[in-house]
Image (cartoon, rainbow, N blue to C red):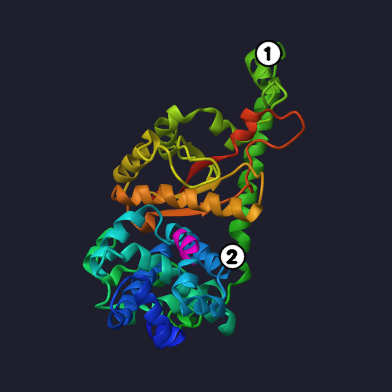
Amino acid sequence: MAENLLELAASQLGASGIGTLASELDLPADKGQSALDTGVAFVLAGMLNKASSKTGMAYLFNLITGSEAADLTDITNKFSNREKLASTLPVGTEMLQKVFGTRVEEVTKVATTEVPGNGGGRLLKLVLPLVAALLGAQVKSQKMDVSDLASFLIGQREFLRNKIPDALLDALDVQGFDELGASLVTHGHAKPQEPREQALHGSGEKKKPVSFSSWFFPLLLVLVALYALNMCMDKGRQERPADQPLETPQEQAFMESPSQPGDDTTLTDRNAQAQLGPDKFTSNLSDYLKSFDRDPNQEFPLEVKFEARTAKILNPNAADIRALAKIMQENPKLTVAIEGHVQGEGNEIREQEISQERADVVREILLQKGIAANRITATGMGSAKPLAGDEPGQNTQKKAQNERISVRVVTTQ
């Protein structure tokens, strides 16, 4: 059984720390424990929802174990007085955005109804660094990897039952408590299991050894057929009139035409897709889905804009996002990957975080439009997949292509 994080938080803070929390929220001292339980429950619910995809779980793991993660001893010491505790608010505000994404405002409203005196948002900002530090300590002491942390979070659900109001589930767009974090169980976060004997060897019946004749003679027949076909083709070539060229002028022109553009710019498939422009997103993706020969790595850039070096989206109602939602509604078996990319200028770790946060924002908007969570993953690629390089003389416009949000089709059925 997983350790109860609600009880662990209370034991780490003690009566003094819980009293400081109550004081900071302007609550009576006897309301501190219930406020702490509410804050921890809300934060864990947000983390379980955040981890609804493998990329989300990995992002959460990095948030908890990263270089900026709070040390448990340091964070509990800050609960010793109000002044120190208030100093954690900037960190808590940033973490709140990372965990709840575009749903911060809705979640904060629900938390406010649960805490007297309209202190719900402040409560979450104060408790979130504590929960992250507690999880970080568990990861360190138990030597957990991502899968271990996912299992630990799953184990917290039994302690959260009856502590999560329906309004919070609605704010997180979760259909019932049993769906909270359900994808951690059903979508591959657990460590690979050993293959079952029956799956490897059938129902237990011993298979007969394959005989030499069972494969040699069919193979021989195939080789004979191929030889005969080749002879017929050679004969056809020999019987072609001498005055008829082996290739027509049109065929020769086609064979001699260059396979790459004639200018100095060599475009990859992704480059070519980017050049098509955002106004063609709908037709490009629709044509791709109708095609039988699909490149699984082809990208479809979305025309979305973010504030410089942040994940604050400037056009959340972008036409391309609406178009993607409509296409996914019309194709209920379609699943996609939203990938965030940046130019690669500055702190690499921070830029990876920004690319992840931006991809998360687009995913959240699609979820709000009714697309199921298990049909969309969000991944921050950082600057790992540039469309335009950083060669000397490379113009600013080409470099700007690297900063983008793209869609990649994962499955269509």
Q: Position of residue 327 (x, y in %)?
A: 34, 40
Sort mark 2 into few (<14), some (14-19) or many (20+) by Cα contacts within 10 Å: few
For mark 2, give the secondary structure. Answer: loop
Q: Quadrant of the N terminus?
A: bottom left
State whether residue 170 is above or below residue 13.
Answer: above
Q: In 3D space, how far apart are the residues under numbered discs 1 and 2 (Cα atoms)?
A: 75 Å
| Residue 92 sits inside the magenta stretch | yes
Q: Position of residue 82 (x, y in %)?
A: 44, 73
Numbered disc in front, either 1 or 2: 2
Tell me which amino acid carries mark 2. Glu
State whether residue 177 is above or below residue 194.
Answer: above
Which residue is under mark 1?
244
Is residue 200 shown to the viewer in this render?
A: no
Q: Main secondary structure of the magenta part?
A: helix
Is residue 368 shown to the viewer in this render?
A: yes
Q: Position of residue 97 (x, y in %)?
A: 43, 57
Tell me which amino acid carries mark 1. Gln
| Residue 282 sits inside the magenta stretch | no
Q: Of callouts 1 and 2, which one flags the residue occurring earlier in the amino acid sequence? A: 2
Which residue is under mark 2?
68
Name, please, the residue furthest toward the right.
Answer: 392
Say whether residue 110 is left or right of residue 69: left
**251 or 51, nearer to the observer:** 51
Q: Which residues are magenta?
A: 88-93
